[in-house]
Amino acid sequence: MTFESPTPETCGIVETDPEGVVFAFHEKAKNPPGNQASAAVYLLEPEVLEWIEDNPDISDFSTEVLPRFMGRIATWSNTGIHRDIGAVSMLLQAQTDPQPPAFWPQTDSWQRAFLSQPIHQEIARIAT
């Protein structure tokens, strides 16, 4: 899955052919050649999983696995709701996005634990 990133330098940027097949990948490049970012959501064929199992020293998907399958990675662009939170400024923006529908619990135990993390205290400090 891909999405258009307003901060492409903080993302893995893909270059695709007209059919949406990836021919190049740029991980957090200073001046990436576009803003179509990898959302790091993958549907993997058994062949890919087998290759990973056969290469137990692999430790980074974007720099060690993706290059092996270049030219065989199809993309789908998410033009709906998606927010990259890899940069503090983007996490802050996500925190100020419109609230979810009323039927989503706002104060469940997960939400309280999530908001108690230090990064959220830093965001609250920056926002004020």
Image: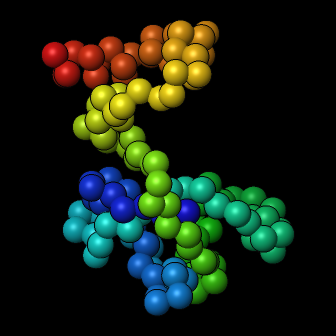
Q: Which of 66 and 126 is in front in this view?
A: 126
**In x, y percent, where is residue 101?**
51, 28
Q: Position of residue 109 (x, y in %)?
A: 61, 10
Q: Nearer the viewer, residue 80 or 34?
A: 80
Q: Give the camera-side residue of 55 and 13.
A: 13
Relative horizontal placement of residue 74, taking residue 119 as reference (left or right): right
Residue 126 placement, left or right of 54: left
Q: Give the residue displayed 55% in from the left and 69% down from the top.
A: 76
The structure residue drawn at horizontal position 60% and vertical position 56%, both measured from the top left corner, is: 41
The residue lying at 79 percent from left, 65 percent from top is 49
Q: Can residue 43 be seen in this view?
A: yes
Q: How many marks?
A: 0
Q: In which quarter of the image is residue 25?
A: bottom left
Question: Which residue corresponds to the image point at 46% horizontal and 82% vertical from the top-left?
Answer: 16
40 versus 120 height, above or below: below
Residue occupying the far left of the picture? 128
Horizontal side of residue 118 vs 89, given as left or right: right
User: Which quarter shows the C terminus?
Assistant: top left
The quarter of the picture where the N terminus appears is bottom right
Residue 35 picture location, percent across and down: 32, 67
The quadrant where residue 104 appears: top right
Does the image show residue 62? no
Residue 78, above or below 111? below
Residue 56 vertical placement versus 94 (above, below): below
Furthest toward the bottom, the residue is 18
Which scheme is used to colour this image of the protein?
rainbow
